[in-house]
Image: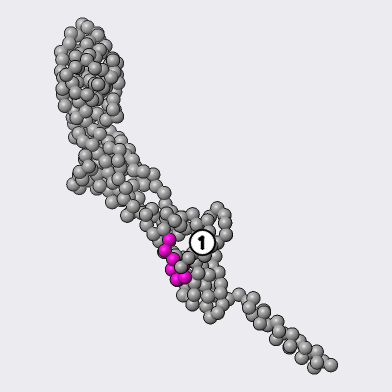
């Protein structure tokens, strides 16, 4: 009786073992490694260990079910930031007839601000946004973070030889921009398209610092004449956007209101400086 019972157990085990064996975990665990944080415009590669066959799967990070990537049956998978950022990936691997699925990994991509310039130094702001400095003064143009690698400064679109630091020291008129990349993605070189326009004017010695818009000019924009009010003013100078003196007029210090003919000036932005009692006061106006 006991022998018959044991024989029945062996038979039952023989029937169940194939099923139990098919449910057993494979003696390996595939793991996905590689480029999971991509630089803009730069592809990356995901990889796993060596197995007999592979099938890669992909799903959106905010939901959905994994979908087999068509044709993705190699040990490696190329991913790019445009199509694959914000997606989870995993691989199904088979070895010696046993198939196992890896854990998911998230692929994402870096995002960076557009290039911008930080401005420091001795300057005032002109009516059209230009940077106005006196001869001998200095402006420091600084690349905004994270652009700190592969830097090149330009003047009117032309590369400035040797200007490859994150700070450009400016003492002359020009239209300055830069190109550069973040150190995290050194090949992601971007161009700054909004220039820092600098004009240089001749400021008299022995006068106080010029403050922007300290003189009221009307009408502004002007077409034929402009009027300003500066008590004790003895000289008025007008500079164009390049810093060139285009008009100089002596005035009577006893008068406070002054009218200047600007009919012959070309259309554009101008800087006006009025000198009174060892003080220079400035204003900006636009000629139609």
- Provide residue 212's location: percent of width, then percent of height: 29, 23
Residue nearest the viewer, comparing 138 with 194: 194
Query: Relative to 86, is 212 above or below?
Result: above
Q: Is residue 274 magenta?
A: no
Judge whether residue 190 can be spotted in this image. yes
Q: Quadrant of the C terminus?
A: top left
What's the image's color scheme? one colour
Residue nearest the viewer, comparing 101 with 280: 101
> What residue sits 49% from the left and 72% below the top?
54
Query: On the image, numbered disc 1 is attached to which residue?
Result: 58
> What residue sits 50% from the left and 57% below the top?
87
Which residue range is magenta in the image? 72-79
Tag 1's secondary structure?
strand
- Provide residue 74's location: percent of width, then percent of height: 45, 71
Q: Is residue 73 magenta?
A: yes
Judge whether residue 204 can be spotted in this image. no
């Amino acid at each position: 009786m006991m022998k018959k019972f044991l024989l029945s157990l062996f038979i039952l085990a023989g029937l169940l073992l194939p099923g139990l064996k098919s449910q057993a975990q494979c003696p390996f665990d595939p793991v996905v490694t590689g480029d999971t944080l991509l630089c803009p415009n730069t592809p990356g590669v995901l990889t796993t260990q060596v197995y007999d066959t592979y099938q890669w799967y992909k799903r959106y990070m905010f939901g959905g079910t994994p979908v087999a990537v068509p044709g993705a049956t190699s040990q490696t998978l190329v991913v790019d930031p445009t199509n694959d950022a914000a997606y989870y990936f995993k691989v199904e691997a088979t070895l010696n007839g046993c198939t196992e699925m890896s854990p998911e990994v998230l692929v994402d991509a870096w995002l960076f601000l557009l290039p911008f310039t930080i401005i420091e130094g001795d300057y005032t702001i002109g009516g059209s946004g230009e940077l106005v400095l006196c001869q001998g003064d200095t402006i420091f143009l600084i690349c905004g973070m994270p652009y700190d690698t592969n830097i090149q400064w330009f003047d009117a679109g032309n590369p400035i030889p040797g200007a490859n630091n994150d700070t450009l020291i400016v003492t002359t008129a020009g239209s300055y921009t830069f190109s550069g990349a973040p150190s995290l993605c050194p090949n992601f070189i971007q161009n700054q398209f909004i220039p820092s326009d600098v004009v240089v004017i001749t400021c008299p010695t022995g006068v106080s610092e010029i403050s922007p818009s300290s003189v009221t000019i009307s009408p502004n924009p002007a077409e034929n004449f402009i009027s300003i009010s500066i008590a004790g003013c003895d000289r008025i100078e007008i500079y164009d956007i390049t810093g060139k003196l285009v008009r100089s007029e002596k005035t009577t210090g006893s008068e406070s209101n002054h009218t200047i003919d600007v009919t012959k000036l070309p259309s554009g932005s101008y800087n006006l400086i009025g000198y009174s009692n060892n003080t220079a006061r400035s204003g900006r106006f636009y000629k139609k």
